[in-house]
Image (cartoon, grey):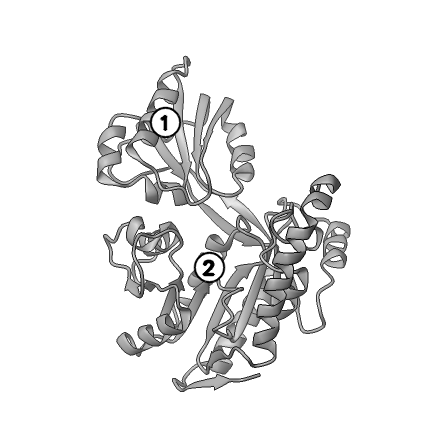
Amino acid sequence: MNPFRLILLFPFVALYGIVTWIRNKFFDWGIFSSISFDFPVISVGNLTTGGTGKTPHVEYLVRLLKDNYKVAILSRGYKRKTNGFLMAGESTGADKIGDEPRQFKSKFSEITVAVDEKRVRGIKELRRLLPETEIILLDDAFQHRWVRPGLSILLTDYHKLYSNDWPLPAGSLREFRKGAERADIIVVTKNSKILSPITRRELTNKLRPGTHQSTYFSYVEHGRFKKIPGIECVNINKNRFNTILLVSGIANPYPLEFHLKSYCDELETLLFPDHHYYTSENVVQIIEKFDNIVTRNKIIVTTEKDSTRLSNPEFLKLLKGYPICYVPIEVVFYKEDKPAFEKQILEYVRKNSGNNKLYQEQN
């Protein structure tokens, strides 16, 4: 971090940090009360403003649990154009539920996906409508302290550890680093595929996990190019391109940029803000940039999350005939982490399943 930026913004950092500290203390002291449930509620979140890999880690948990339990995902539905509780259907658009819930429902049609900015209300409504629900996964809920999850998973990006960061606006932390103490599990994400024992030790020492916390490490595996439903992409099976145009509206596109460079001679980018909702003008902008690329062997590639926002019927008409696809990703835990991580999740679920009673904690 630029020290001059920190010095300049320090009064605002202090003000923001104090406000969030007071809020957290109100929960710690019982002035604000958290609601707990005695069935499995697992939260996945972070301390930063985004880009740590929450979505693929939630998907990892779904794959781990869905064959043996009735799983539901509850999300805030960031940047959706609706309010309140809403259950996702097969054709519910990203504008109504948000891009991440839309992605969850597209990939796992057999599970329940719902959104509600008030997570306590959302959990109660899910259990009222679908009492057979056994596990609820809370997406991006680390700061949502009105719910006390039974198991809290905190993610931190290898390239931007929360231990090296500062609160907003100088840094990207939503609260002071001390907030990490609420987590039961810390996962360092977006590591390289080979992680040496020395690097593992250094990262753990920087994070300084508590005795109650388990620390695991994961990396991202990129899949083969996939078609966006409604668009025929004839170039999708090629292994090499002269030019790839990456269209992205996510917080940290650098891992995908690095991955795509191995598939092309030249990588062009058209980057939008995180969770950007595309307009017709944006789609025309994409088309114009692609048309101005002079090479013949070229393709438009986007992220899986962006593909949900580009699946608007109006956009699909504009993009008809253009070679556009997305790259799916999955989280992989290292062989020394995977068994222990999955065992901890499954043991928590097994110990806390089978009872539907709600109770409130004042502590």
Asked if labels 1 and 2 touch by Cβ distance under 8 angstroms, the answer is no
Give the residue displayed 46% in from the left and 83% down from the top.
Answer: 38
Amino acid type, callout 2: Val
Q: Quadrant location of residue 128?
A: bottom left
| Marker disc for residue 118 | none
- Classify 44 as above or below 312: below
Quadrant occupied by the C terminus = bottom right
| Element assignment for label 2 | helix
Q: Is residue 83 left or right of residue 216?
A: left
- Classify 204 as above or below 220: below
Residue matched to label 2: 58
Quadrant occupied by the N terminus = top right
Q: Residues within 10 Å of mark 2 (few under 14, many from 20)?
A: many
Residue 216 seen in render: no
Give the residue displayed 39% in from the left and 71% down from the top.
Answer: 68
179 and 103: which is toward the camera:
179
Q: How crowded is mark 1: few (under 14 residues within 10 Å), some or many (20 or more)?
A: some
Residue 48, horizontal then vertical, whole percent? 58, 53
359 and 257: which is toward the camera:
359
Give the residue displayed 51% in from the left and 79% down from the top.
Answer: 33
Residue 152 seen in render: yes
Residue matched to label 1: 286
Q: Is residue 256 left or right of residue 340?
A: left
Q: Quadrant location of residue 304?
A: top left
Amino acid type, callout 1: Ile
